[in-house]
Image (cartoon, rainbow, N blue to C red):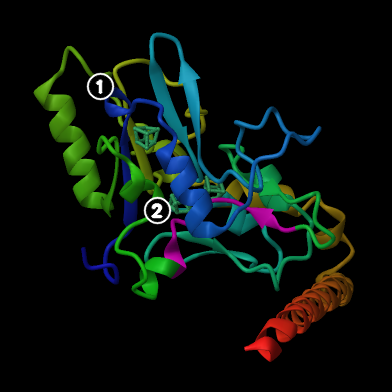
Amino acid sequence: MNTNTKHWSILTDVTKCIGCESCVEGCREANHTGNDRPWAWQNGVRDLSASRWTTIDRLPENHYVRRQCRHCISPACASACPVGALSKTPEGAVVYDAVKCMGCRYCMMACPFGVPRYSWDSAVPEVRKCVLCHDRIKKGEAKEPACTSSCPTGATIFGPRDEMLAEAKKRLAAKPDFYKQHIWGEHEAGGTGVLTISDVDLPLPMDVPEDALPKRTWAALRTVPFVFVGVGAGMIGLRFIIGRRNEIRAVEAEAKARQAAAAVAEESTEQSPEENDQ
Ligand code: SF4
Ligand code: SF4
Ligand code: SF4
């Protein structure tokens, strides 16, 4: 796939999914998201979380459906972010820049699919969600996202959106009495990069309007204090908040580096008697 010119997309076919969660673990490993932990603020460890960027919802009669950021064509999360910490790349992935984030969490309120999570347990919490493995693919470290390459049944596949849409339509046309004649993500919220087809109704929050949502989020944002008190005063506050978050982040990084250096020094001290014997 030419990753420079097409809108990247994932097509998930619920009828092929066996619920093995290889996609979940592939994502965790590739993105170093850490282990699931039962924090009080989560709806169970299998829900999307700061450490689980994609999950599998279990439906009756052995049906499983993948949930992740849908990489909306017009993402409400990016539109709601006052500092541009979430942005849509030319390839279609909606990515996050922790350095710009001031922690307001407007993105979490704006997302019509309830996707972004917050790493509450961190000293400098960040917004966490699927980023379509954008950096790894752009750098040439991977040809496709870890979730799709981990799937043993081809239930979730990666490609340009027009090709994924054509493939979905082909499958629906080939088995009209089997598949629900609907492609989840074709039109909802103005269309999404992640598409889903199924033989049963899905609990995906697809009752969102079909028009792009950013216009609505800006209408709502006008009512929040940040905009109300004036952009100038707001920006001074933002610079302080972002600066403070980055200072804490730098102190943490320095502490980690010191710990690592101390561990290396300790290890070499322990090894030296043996080396002396040799
Ligand atoms: S699903 Fe939510 S978090 Fe993902 S791009 Fe769309 S609005 Fe943003
Ligand atoms: S595209 Fe990448 S970040 Fe997103 S769910 Fe798949 S593996 Fe995780
Ligand atoms: S790896 Fe494939 S088959 Fe397994 S749960 Fe994920 S989408 Fe379903």
Task: Report helix, strand or loop for mark 2.
Answer: helix
Amino acid type indicated by mark 2 = Ala
Q: Is residue 70 visible?
A: no
Q: Which residue is mark 1?
A: 181
Q: Earlier in the sequence, mark 2 or mark 1?
A: 2
Q: Is residue 129 magenta?
A: yes
- Residue 75 drawn at (x, y percent): 52, 52
Q: CA distance from mark 2 to mark 1?
A: 29 Å
Q: Which residue is mark 2?
A: 146
| Magenta range | 126-135
Q: Is residue 44 above or below residue 243?
A: above
- Residue 261 drawn at (x, y percent): 76, 82
Task: Report helix, strand or loop for mark 1.
Answer: loop
- Residue 271 drawn at (x, y percent): 70, 80
On screen, residue 135 versus residue 184, left or right, reads right
Nearer to me, 277 or 110: 277
